[in-house]
Image (cartoon, helix red, strand yellow):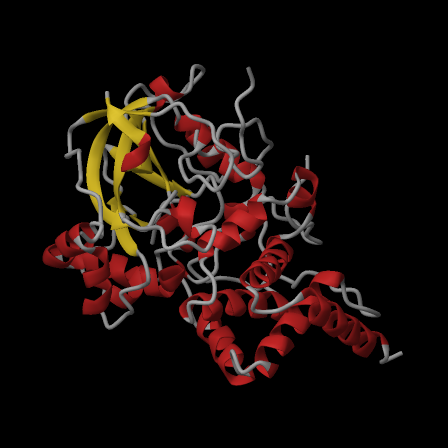
Amino acid sequence: MMNYRGIHDMGGLPAGTVEPTEHDYALWEKRVDALLVLLTKKGLMTVDELRRNIEGLGLDAYDKMSYYERWIYSITHTLIQRGVINIDELGRKMAEAQARADGGR
Amino acid sequence: MAAAESVTPQFRTGDRVAVRAAYPIGHVRTPYYIRGKRGVIERLCGAYGNPEELAYARPGLPKQPLYRVRFLQREVWPAYDGSPGDTVDVEIFQHWLERG
Amino acid sequence: MPHDHDHPHDHGNLHDHAQPHRHPPRPDQDDTITQWRAMEIAVRELLIEKGILSAEEVRRQVEDMDNRTPLLGATAVARAWTDPEYRKLLLSDGNAACEVLGMERGPYKLVVVENTDQVHNVIVCTLCSCYPRWLLGLPPDWYKSRNYRSRVINQPRDVLREFGTAIPGHVTVRVHDSTADMRYLVLPKRPAGTEGWSEEKLAALVSRDSMIGVAFAQNP
């Protein structure tokens, strides 16, 4: 019988050479980090919910998304679960943001 | 009667313990690789809210005692090829531990 | 094998970050933004509109993290190297030791583990990326990578060798998996030939990687 194992629970799984890569974080990534810190400090979400919603991604998404992409997905999902934002306003705001970014051309 | 704010610690430094071999879904902070393994309490870290509950926006009370548990690597990994005294220390909540 | 972040320049040499050098930011597309960036903008603007947070708070928090560098942790290490009483405090009550130096206690309990001639410590969070951010700043990509999180836990000597760090067989390697509410800092061994050095000079030898445990402090 195969036991259930979370996709994030990778200690001891076969993996490749550790490449000592790092990058200076883009502003948007730093803002995502800031959102998490501020929201947890204000008691609007917990790091536990952040982690749980990341763990809920499929394995493919987990490995393909970057660290802060997983974070913003999870923060947004948590805020929807908590009723702090709703899906309708999120969709509208995202379209606005996209249009503003594209409108520069 | 009000529920206790935190659960009484059951273990002390030096106690031999075993990690329960359970595999639920949900937000669990006991890593897969350590389940079913035997180790020794290195220290009591204190009592903290249960992440398995906090992850669902629930209060996570009563607080659970959290321990650092030390394991011999050669007892955790069948093919461990480091030194025989090498260890891995893992933070584990009391409700995942039994007397070993 | 999937891994985080492709990088345009060579990383064949060992990363030693006593003097961190800048890396290029990840390339963003210059014609549009990804759905994730649009999501960040949208969530931030919604929260500001709802009065939950302000643009100023976000700006200040970004600046706060930018100002956190491994020098904070290195300062504590250098003090411990020169002051035996401080070393005892750092090892028994890491948060109080931070306060003594005018640094934040931090939001989590700090466990400091000491490297000696008999023991070498290395830190990982196999489940995610827990890291003593208030003392070291943001963690590097590799610390959060699949390969590190998967292999340093059961092949620590091999992974350390990939960082150019060889641990002799008679030295015990202890891996610490940061799974819950503790956060860890390695107190590296003081390099030989540094007798009488000022704390400031000593701190410059203490790389971020030595406080994670994948490297030794630099030799003079």
Q: Position of residue C30 (x, y in %)?
A: 81, 69
As displayed, is residue C48 above or below residue C185? below
Q: Does A54 sit left or right of C202 as displayed? A: right
Residue at screen point 48% across, 31% down: B24
Q: Nearer the viewer, residue A37 or C99?
A: A37
Where residue C116 sits, quadrant-wise, is top left
Residue at screen point 63% across, 71% down: C43
Q: Pick out the residue farthest to the front.
A: B1
Q: Nearer the viewer, residue C30 or A75?
A: A75
Residue C12 seen from this side? yes
> What is the count of numbered marks?
0
Q: Does B32 sit left or right of B89 as displayed? A: right
As displayed, is residue C131 above or below residue C199? above
Q: Position of residue A11 (x, y in %)?
A: 48, 32
Residue at screen point 28% across, 29% down: B97
Residue C190 seen from this side? no
Q: Position of residue C211 (x, y in %)?
A: 36, 51
Q: Pick out the residue farthest to the left.
A: C85
